């Protein structure tokens, strides 16, 4: 039991409208601000979680073995810099995509 609407063949006008909508959505960049926001927001979230976990483990290690603080401290700062560097690169790419718009068709 099918409905008559489903059995009816598509008209030429309907298929042209669908092709036009598909072409419009492929060239439309209205979702670019959302993508940039996700790049910056998720980069910040990941960086903050990573630094928080690492700092917590560093403090636990320093409390258990205070003599290892001098050995662990440079490694913690190096890793914190790398985590922040990944976030800064994400912000730079997001701003580049938002302002320079490299995906716009010429």
Image (cartoon, grey):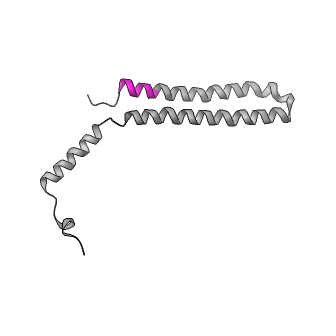
Can you name the residue that lies furthest to the left here?
12
Q: Which residues are magenta?
A: 93-106
Point out residue 11 in the picture as x, y percentages from the top left corner: 13, 57
Residue at the farthest bottom position:
1
Q: Is residue 94 magenta?
A: yes
Q: Residue at image x 64%, y 35%?
A: 50
- Which quarter of the image is occupied by the N terminus? bottom left
As for residue 3 lying within the magenta part, the answer is: no
Q: Is residue 19 left or right of residue 42?
A: left
In the rendered image of this protein, does residue 1 appear above or below residue 96? below
Q: In which image quadrant can residue 98 be found?
A: top left
Residue 67 placement (x, y as % from top left) = 87, 28
Q: Quadrant of residue 31?
A: top left
> Of 31 and 93, which appears nearest the observer?
31
At 36% from the left edge and 23% from the top edge, which residue is drawn? 100
Front residue of 25 and 79:
25
Which image quarter: residue 43? top right
Tally of numbered discs: 0
Give the left or right position of residue 70, taking residue 18 as reference.
Answer: right
Residue at 57% across, 36% down? 45
| Left or right of residue 10: residue 64 | right
Q: What's the residue at 62%, 27% (across, down)?
A: 82
Picture coordinates of residue 55, whole percent (x, y): 71, 32
Q: Quadrant of the C terminus?
A: top left
């Amino acid at each position: 039991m099918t409905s008559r609407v489903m059995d009816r063949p598509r008209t030429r006008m309907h298929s042209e409208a669908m092709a036009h909508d598909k072409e419009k959505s492929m060239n439309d960049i209205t979702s670019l601000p959302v993508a940039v926001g996700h790049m910056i927001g998720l980069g910040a979230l990941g960086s903050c979680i990573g630094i928080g976990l690492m700092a917590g483990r560093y403090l636990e290690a320093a409390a258990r073995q205070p003599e290892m603080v001098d050995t662990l401290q440079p490694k913690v700062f190096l890793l914190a810099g790398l985590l922040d560097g990944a976030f800064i690169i994400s912000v730079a790419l997001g701003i580049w995509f938002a302002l320079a718009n490299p995906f716009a068709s010429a």
